[in-house]
Image: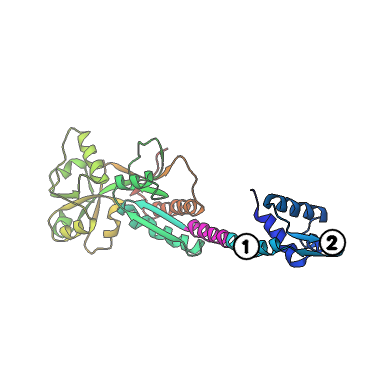
Amino acid sequence: MNISPRQLRLFLALSESLNFSKTAEQLFMTQPSLSKAIRDLEEALGLVLFERTTRSVHLTASGTRLASMARSVIGEFDSGLERMRTSAEQEAQQLSIASLPSLASVILPATCGALERRFAQPRIAIHDCSNSASIQRLLNYQVDFALASVMPSHPELQYEELLRDQFVLLSCGAWRKRIADEVMLDELLRLPVISMTDASTAMRYISAAFLQRGVEFRPKMQLDQVGTIAGFLKEGLGVAVLPYLGMMPMVSLRGMKISSISDGPLRSVGMVTRRQGGTSAIARAAMEEIRKVVGALMEKHQGWLHPASA
């Protein structure tokens, strides 16, 4: 049995008017087309739904029972479509981004602010986690895209570099007076350096830069959080090596000095997306806003942030 919602709607319209020509006119169809649709429905059901005479049309007992059931079926059908439409609209407003904390804190606030002005009540989830965790979330379809600082080698992913981030040396208190505005990598070997842990991409960049010189870099202390590093710096326990974007939340802290590492590495910063599958409108808008934010940051912090490699 193959009965469509359209057939039931035609039947209900006729059951209310009991007039073929009037119903056909209301439905913008010809009377023969309406008559055929009703005959097809009767044949599919094996029931006579209307008693037809030259003067009148009446519902049969079967037609009366079907009219009651059809109203319920069509009502449920329309309600289901509305629920699907509402769900699709809500889903279209949902966005999930994974990002390194150092990138999330600097790039994503302005991005989310712009999205809230462009979309009606967007639902945005930010997962600030390690580079590897961000990539894994993307592979698991838990986020729309990721902000990362290492180009992934996974064949399912693609990487759009946005900028290159210079590493800097931070000092405070007595160390501030002893550190020049510009230092060389080799000078770090003689300083009490506090760095991120080996699991961080920042430490991997610095370690790789020293390994290229045939030297193993061993910092005085390694910590997970930038805020914790700031506390140790203020106490005068050492100096810190961080990428410029990573230390930006500390710029406002009183007494902090930023020195450039003239021969230091440049950290790549970019967006990672899946090669296959579509991208939602709000995700595309988010990536567009991120490019704008990055452009504004590069203009404001010239000399510290560098254009993406060609």
Near-viewer residue (271 or 27): 27
- Determine which quarter of the picture holds residue 75: bottom right
Q: Amino acid at mark 2?
A: Thr
- Nearest to the eye among marks 1 and 2: give it: 2
x, y percent for residue 235: 13, 61
- The verdict on residue 80 being magenta is yes
> Principal SS element in the magenta part?
helix
Asked if residue 204 can be seen in this view, the reply is: yes
Q: Is residue 48 left or right of residue 306?
A: right
Residue that numbered label 1 is attached to: 69
Q: Is residue 146 left or right of residue 24?
A: left
Q: Crowding at label 2, few (<14), some or many (≥20) Cα neighbours within 10 Å?
A: few
- The verdict on residue 117 being magenta is no
x, y percent for residue 131: 30, 46
Residue that numbered label 2 is attached to: 53
Q: The residue tagged with tag 1: helix, strand or loop? A: helix
- Determine which quarter of the picture holds residue 201: top left
Residue at the image point whose x is 72% and y is 50% from the top? 43
Residue 266 against residue 104 in the figure, above or below: above
Q: Amino acid at mark 1?
A: Met
Residue at the image point whose x is 77% and y is 67% from the top? 17
* Magenta highlight range: 79-93
Residue at the image point whose x is 46% and y is 61% from the top? 122
